[in-house]
Amino acid sequence: MKRLLLIEDDEITVRVVRSLFENEGFSVSTANDGAAGLALAKKHPPDVVLLDLNLPGMPGLDVCREIRRDRTLNALPIMMLTARGETADLVLGLEIGADDYVAKPFKPPELMARVKALLRRTVPAGADQPILIGSLVIDPASFSVTRKGKSIPLSTLEFRLLYFLVTHPNQVFSRDQLLDNVWGRDRNVIPRSVDVYIRHLRAKVTPASGGALVVKTLRDAGYMLEITDVNPRDI
């Protein structure tokens, strides 16, 4: 049974979401403010979080930020719920580490489809053995990246993007191609999301790779991951 945590202060939304997901066999926990939701996530880690941005006390963006800082929760899929349609708010949420969003008012079937799509993306299709790149170990079974035994925390989609690029080295992909392959065709994110995640990967992974892994930007073309001084069988 999948466990969903809903952090939302609107009672009507809570009732709708609880009924929707419990009817689909989910176990649903709820919190009506950010601090309580964060505490609940730490005490009983769910499989996915639905997080409203406009929360009393601790804002949703701060909740998202704290989840990504927690080593035991940083790979937890987070779906933002927001009535704000402004691109800046959505990009900020993605910058902090949210995986996707659904704008209010939403249609229940759409929300269900979005969450199921996010859960399907939790494990890379066909993932098997760890990949070694220089001193990096990328393990798709545990969604972990380490360098000399030290963990490099990545969100679910940061890991999926890295895994896709690593398994397709020295190939150029446009934003739309990356969205299709990493987020999926049923995505509901903006193309600029790719830029956010690429920037995250560069900050987190490239400096720790010892020069073996570089994410390059090719103007008007897209992005490419270049691997150097690595045995091809380790790719």
Image (cartoon, grey):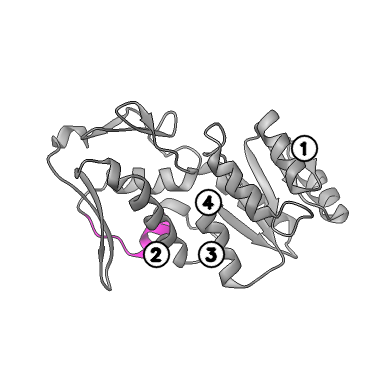
Residue pictured at 26% horizontal, 71% vertical: 219
- The residue labelled by disc 3 is 91
- The residue labelled by disc 2 is 176
201 sits to left or right of 25: left
Residue pictured at 81% horizontal, 47% vertical: 32
Q: Nearer the viewer, residue 169 or 108?
A: 169
Q: Compare marks 2 and 4 and give the one earlier in the sequence.
A: 4
Task: Indicate which label's residue lies in the foreground, 1 or 3.
Answer: 3
Q: Quadrant of the N terminus?
A: top right
- The residue labelled by disc 4 is 97
Percent position of residue 144, x then y: 41, 33
Q: Separation of disc 4 and disc 3 at Cα? A: 10 Å
Amino acid of disc 2: Asp
Say if 167 sits above or below 92 in the image: above
Percent position of residue 68, x then y: 54, 43
Are the residues tagged 1 and 3 within 8 Å (C-beta)? no
Task: Indicate which label's residue lies in the foreground, 2 or 4.
Answer: 4
- In magenta, the rendered stretch is 171-180
Instruction: State yes or no: residue 174 in magenta.
Output: yes
- The residue labelled by disc 1 is 29
Count of labels in the image:
4
Residue pictured at 37% horizontal, 64% vertical: 175
Q: Nearer the viewer, residue 110 or 223?
A: 223
